């Protein structure tokens, strides 16, 4: 009887000690964090980001933002949260974080970076613009990400022309314009091949008008010439051809011999 009682009492004692140890282990990180400065927490978050531990970094950065509220460190933590959210493929959250930053801190020295990062997120979201995924309908591709990226980069270079990010933003803006023009021409070509002549002409004209300096304008004008010719709209055809030959006198569409002697109507 005494042995059985002792065994039960020993088992309860061991269970109690285990619970105490578990509670102590679970409370230690919170107690330690409470004693850490915002700067120390930020350093730990940066270490997590350097090793790709993005989720942990976000949690720590959120504590930094709360603990250092009203300081430049809190602003930097918020920017880093946006970056880390992007790296975890939380694009919507990242953009929301950056939008909030620009709205709440319009005079912050980090606004140029926030605009650049916002543009970069949208830019990379549609980086395969010219690839056109196999099997995906051309008319289903949404170019809004590219347009949003362009707007962010434009706001950056207009507000902060001397920013360290401005030159790269300008390069990306040029790329976006050329890509959007190429996309419009790609769709116009798609319509032309399928006999949707008016749609082809309108889409090509849109490319020429919206992106007059883009290289894709050469083919856009040719598509207009071809579509108007098939539609019997000779005046519009001749006008488009005149613009094509004036602006692109050495065009492969004007001089078929430049395209390995293929007839100009078979250059695709």
Image: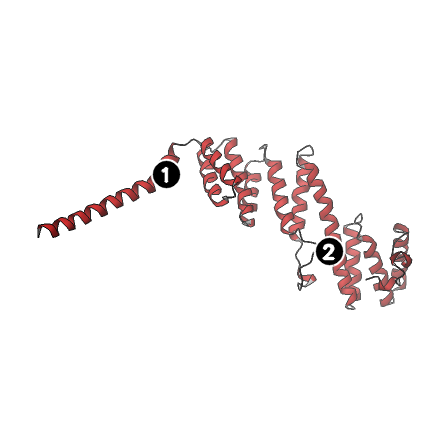
Q: Is residue 115 left or right of residue 29?
A: right
Q: Is residue 53 left or right of residue 20?
A: right
Which secondary structure, mark 2? helix
Residue 262 against residue 36 in the figure, above or below: below
Residue 220 against residue 161 in the figure, above or below: below
Q: Which mark is residue 125?
A: none
**Residue where numbered disc 2 is placed:** 183
Q: Residue at x 86, y 60 (%)?
A: 225
Residue 162 against residue 93 in the figure, above or below: above
Camera-nearest label, 1 or 2: 1
Residue 264: image location, x then y, percent: 88, 61
Tags 1 and 2 in contact by the CB under 8 Å rule?
no
Quadrant of the image occupied by residue 185: bottom right
Dot placed on the residue nearer the N-terminal end, 1 or 2:
1
**Residue where numbered disc 1 is placed:** 30
Residue 149: image location, x then y, percent: 65, 46
Q: Is residue 102 left or right of residue 45?
A: right
Residue 224: image location, x then y, percent: 83, 60
Which secondary structure, mark 1? helix
Residue lying at the far front of the rendered structure: 3
Of the 4 image quadrants, the one containing the C terminus is bottom right
Residue 68: image location, x then y, percent: 46, 32
Residue 169 against residue 8 in the figure, above or below: above
Q: Nearer the viewer, residue 123 or 52?
A: 52
């Amino acid at each position: 009887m005494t042995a059985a009682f002792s065994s039960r009492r020993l088992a309860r004692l061991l269970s109690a000690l285990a619970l105490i140890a578990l509670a102590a282990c679970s409370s230690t990180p919170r107690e330690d964090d409470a004693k850490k400065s915002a700067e120390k927490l930020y350093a730990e978050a940066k270490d997590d980001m350097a090793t790709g531990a993005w989720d942990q970094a976000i949690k720590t950065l959120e504590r930094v933002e709360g603990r250092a509220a009203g300081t430049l460190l809190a602003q930097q933590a918020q920017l880093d949260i946006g970056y880390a959210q992007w790296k975890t493929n939380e694009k919507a959250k990242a953009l929301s974080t950056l939008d909030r930053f620009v709205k709440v801190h319009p005079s912050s020295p980090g606004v140029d970076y926030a605009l650049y990062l916002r543009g970069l997120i949208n830019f990379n979201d549609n980086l395969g613009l010219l690839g056109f995924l196999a099997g995906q309908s051309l008319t289903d591709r949404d170019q809004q990400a590219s347009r949003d990226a362009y707007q962010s980069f434009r706001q950056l270079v207009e507000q902060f022309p001397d920013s360290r990010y401005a030159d790269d933003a300008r390069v990306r803006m040029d790329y976006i314009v050329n890509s959007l023009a190429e996309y419009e021409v790609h769709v116009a070509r798609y319509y032309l091949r399928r006999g949707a002549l008016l749609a082809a002409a309108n889409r090509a004209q849109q490319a020429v008008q919206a992106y007059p300096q883009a290289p894709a304008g050469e083919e856009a004008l040719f598509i207009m010439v071809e579509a108007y010719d098939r539609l019997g709209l000779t005046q519009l055809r001749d006008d488009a051809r005149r613009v094509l030959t004036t602006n692109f006198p050495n065009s492969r569409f004007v001089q078929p011999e430049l395209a390995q002697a293929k007839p100009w109507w078979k250059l695709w």
